[in-house]
Structure formats: structure tokens, C-alpha cells
């Protein structure tokens, strides 16, 4: 079964083609990062326009790279949400038209579930249950994963996402965009014990994340230190605080749920400290550790096409009346 997956939820225009939910035939990702650089963050209006301009050629490239013809596609899948609504609608409308013209079923995929699926694309067999951390510029969530399409949300951010906070602080310091990779690189020259950051506490006792407090605290340090700010030490301390906070909740749920594996996915999972510290956690609790290769960490069409196979097996198709959504989980959505 060959499924085509379209991803346009943020600033990557991507089409992937995957066979039987496992074998990637192609995965073409056009990153718009250069278009957003001068603004220090993703500008939704520009993102939608870029998707519109690029989606055609990204599809063509994906088809030719896979060495198949469009008629060999068994189903069309697309990110239905969450994400930027204007961006989502470009991929969603395009997918509807494609599905109609090919007379093949349409599958609407939850973007977060697709991130959790990425280990399936690089490992013959994935050990479940897993604790899955999704951490990117738009999301920070923890899931209990019993298998493909069997997810229980355990934690999510109540405000900013971890990558967003890194991007905002880097922008504030005039370092450039995206901030995450820059902070990752520059932190290597600093001492992470130089500045201390308090961990946010959610008053109702839940294990949701809140990153806005860390961001405000970082801004206060920058303001207070002024010219005295030791940049590399500050960045190393800031990055270490974010990673420690991310993994603190992960460890809490590992102890509670006793999984067999740990999955870390999303753009921030490219971070070298997170990859290393995540490994330490996995080793400590004797878990199989699943990290994706860089292309699969960021948003991509292959992860959409991959999990869509399981939607297909369960008969979870959508009709042409359905729409994309920006927020997480409207009623009845899987
Ligand atoms: O998954 P992604 O490509 O897009 C979405 O946000 O959905 O993730 C992009 C995020 C940005 O915030 C970027 O700064 C962050 O991932 N990122 C990193 C690293 N590489 C990308 N953050 C920390 N360290 C990195 N090496
Ligand atoms: Zn994503």
C-alpha cells in the first residue's frame, strides 16, 4: 500500500511517500526558514503564501524521487492539525483536490501523532509502551504510547513551546533565527552552571509544562546583567535549564507508567544536549531509546504518510466537508 503524505502545518512544505507505513520512498522537505529569518520568527501570512507557491513542485519532486506515478498512490493523507490555520488550509485544500482527482481516499492526520510515529520509519520493530516527548517550535507534549494510534496525552505546555522560547531569547539577543540551533552551538563554549533558573510550578499540581516563566526570567537576567552578561555562559545555563525541565516531567512519567522505551521527537530533538541527556535517562531506566535522524525530527511528509497507513487500516477516512483545525483535538478527532 503506497500512501502520499502532505505536511504544511508551519513553515515546511513537505510531501512524503511511504509504503506500508514503513518504507520511505521519498521525503521532500522545502524549508521556508530563509523567508522568515529577517522577522526572527515564522510570519503566518508569508508561510501560507510560500506553501501555495511551492506545494506543486514539492509534489512533483516527491513523485519523481519515489520513481512512481501518481496513479500508483493508494491514498492521500494530510496534516489536519494542529498548526497555523492558513498554512494548514493550503495543504488541506490541495490534498482534497488531489484525492478527488485521483479518486483515492483522504486521510486527515493529527500532526503530533505523526511525530510520535517517526521511530517506526527507522526501526524494523518499535518497543511499546513508550513515553514520547514531542518538542518543537510549536509544541511541547508528553504522551503514553501503546502503539501506532494508541496515544494518551500526559502533559502539554500551557503557554510557549520549548523551541519557541529558545527562538525568542535568541531573537532578543540579536543572534538570529532559528535560535535553537544557534543556542545549541554557542552553548558548547559556555559553563551551564553560571546562571541558575527556577523551575516553573503549575499551581494545580499537574505535570503540564509552562515555559513563559523561564523566558521572563531569562529576559530579566539579560536586562540586569547588561554589558556584563557572559553570553556563552548564559546560553549554556538557559539551554541546560530547558532540557532539565523537559526531562524532569519525562522521568516522572517513566516512573509512573513503567514503559519499555523512550521516544523524543520534534525540531528541538535535534538539540545535542537533549539527545545526550535523554540517552542518560533511557539508560538509567533501562529503556530502548528512539531518536530520529535530523530530517525526520523536523516537520516532514513521510511521518504523515507513515501513520496514515494505520488510519487506513482502521478505516479512518475523512470526507470533503471536513476542515483543518489550528487547535488540538476537537471532539472525536484521533
Ligand atoms: O519541528 P520544527 O521544525 O517546526 C515546528 O516548530 O513545528 O521545529 C523547529 C524548532 C525551532 O524552534 C528551532 O529553534 C528548534 O526546533 N531547533 C532546535 C535545534 N534545531 C532546531 N532547538 C534546539 N537545538 C537545536 N539543535
Ligand atoms: Zn511538528
Image (spheres, helix red, strand yellow):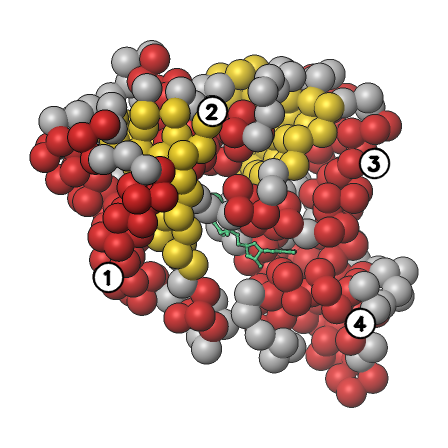
Residue that label 2 marks: 22
Q: Give residue 53's mark.
A: 1
Q: Nearer the viewer, residue 139 or 63?
A: 63
1 or 3: mark nearer the eye: 1
Residue visible at 80% across and 79% down in the picture: 229
- Mark 4 or 1 closer to N-term? 1
Residue that label 4 marks: 232
**Measured Cα–Cα span from mark 4 to mark 2:** 41 Å
Describe the element under mark 1 as helix, strand or loop: helix
The answer to whether 123 appears left or right of 287 in the picture is: left
**Measured Cα–Cα span from mark 1 to mark 2:** 30 Å
**At which x and y percent is residue 199?**
75, 49
The response on whether ligand 1 sits within 8 Å of label 1 is no
Q: Quadrant of the N terminus?
A: top left
Is the residue 228 above or below the residue 165 in the image?
below
Figure quadrant of residue 70:
top left
4 or 2: mark nearer the eye: 2
Describe the element under mark 4 as helix, strand or loop: helix
3 or 2: mark nearer the eye: 2
4 or 1: mark nearer the eye: 1
**Measured Cα–Cα span from mark 4 to mark 1:** 39 Å
Q: Residue furthest front?
A: 67
Residue that label 3 marks: 280
Describe the element under mark 3 as helix, strand or loop: helix
Residue visible at 39% across and 48% down in the picture: 28
Q: Does the image show residue 92? A: yes
- Mark 3 or 2 closer to N-term? 2
**At which x and y percent is residue 315?**
28, 13
Residue visible at 88% across and 65% down in the picture: 191
- Mark 1 or 2 closer to N-term? 2
**Measured Cα–Cα span from mark 1 to mark 3:** 43 Å
**Measured Cα–Cα span from mark 3 to mark 4:** 24 Å
Amino acid at each position: 500500500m503506497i500512501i502520499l503524505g502532505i505536511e504544511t502545518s508551519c513553515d515546511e512544505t513537505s510531501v512524503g511517500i511511504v509504503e506500508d507505513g514503513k518504507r520511505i520512498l521519498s521525503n521532500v522537505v522545502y524549508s521556508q526558514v530563509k523567508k522568515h529569518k529577517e522577522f526572527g520568527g515564522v510570519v503566518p501570512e508569508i508561510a501560507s503564501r510560500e506553501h501555495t507557491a511551492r506545494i506543486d513542485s514539492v509534489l512533483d519532486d516527491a513523485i519523481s524521487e519515489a520513481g512512481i506515478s501518481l496513479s500508483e498512490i493508494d491514498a492521500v493523507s494530510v496534516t489536519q492539525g494542529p498548526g497555523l490555520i492558513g498554512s494548514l488550509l493550503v495543504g488541506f485544500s490541495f490534498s482534497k483536490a488531489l484525492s478527488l482527482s485521483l479518486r483515492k481516499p483522504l486521510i486527515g492526520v493529527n500532526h503530533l501523532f505523526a511525530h510520535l510515529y517517526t521511530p517506526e520509519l527507522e526501526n524494523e520493530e518499535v518497543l511499546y509502551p513508550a513515553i514520547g516527548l514531542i518538542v518543537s517550535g510549536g509544541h511541547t507534549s508528553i504522551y503514553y504510547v501503546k502503539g501506532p494510534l494508541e496515544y494518551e496525552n500526559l502533559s502539554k505546555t500551557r503557554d510557549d513551546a520549548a523551541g519557541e522560547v529558545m527562538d525568542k531569547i535568541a531573537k532578543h539577543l540579536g543572534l538570529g533565527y532559528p535560535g535553537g540551533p544557534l543556542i545549541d552551538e554557542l552553548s558548547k563554549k559556555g559553563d551551564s552552571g553560571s546562571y541558575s533558573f527556577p523551575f516553573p510550578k503549575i499551581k494545580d499540581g499537574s505535570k503540564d509544562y509552562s515555559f513563559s516563566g523561564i523566558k521572563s526570567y531569562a529576559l530579566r537576567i539579560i536586562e540586569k546583567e547588561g554589558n556584563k552578561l557572559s553570553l556563552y555562559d548564559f546560553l549554556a545555563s538557559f539551554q541546560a535549564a530547558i532540557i532539565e525541565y523537559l526531562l524532569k516531567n519525562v522521568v516522572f512519567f517513566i516512573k509512573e507508567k513503567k514503559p519499555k522505551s523512550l521516544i523524543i521527537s520534534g525540531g528541538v530533538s535535534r538539540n545535542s544536549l537533549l539527545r545526550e541527556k535523554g540517552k542518560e535517562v533511557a539508560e538509567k531506566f533501562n529503556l530502548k531509546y528512539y531518536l530520529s535522524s535530523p530530517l525526520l525530527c523536523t516537520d516532514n511528509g513521510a511521518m504523515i504518510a507513515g501513520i496514515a497507513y494505520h488510519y487506513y487500516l482502521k478505516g479512518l477516512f475523512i470526507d470533503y466537508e471536513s476542515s483543518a483545525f489550528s487547535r488540538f483535538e476537537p471532539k472525536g478527532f484521533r
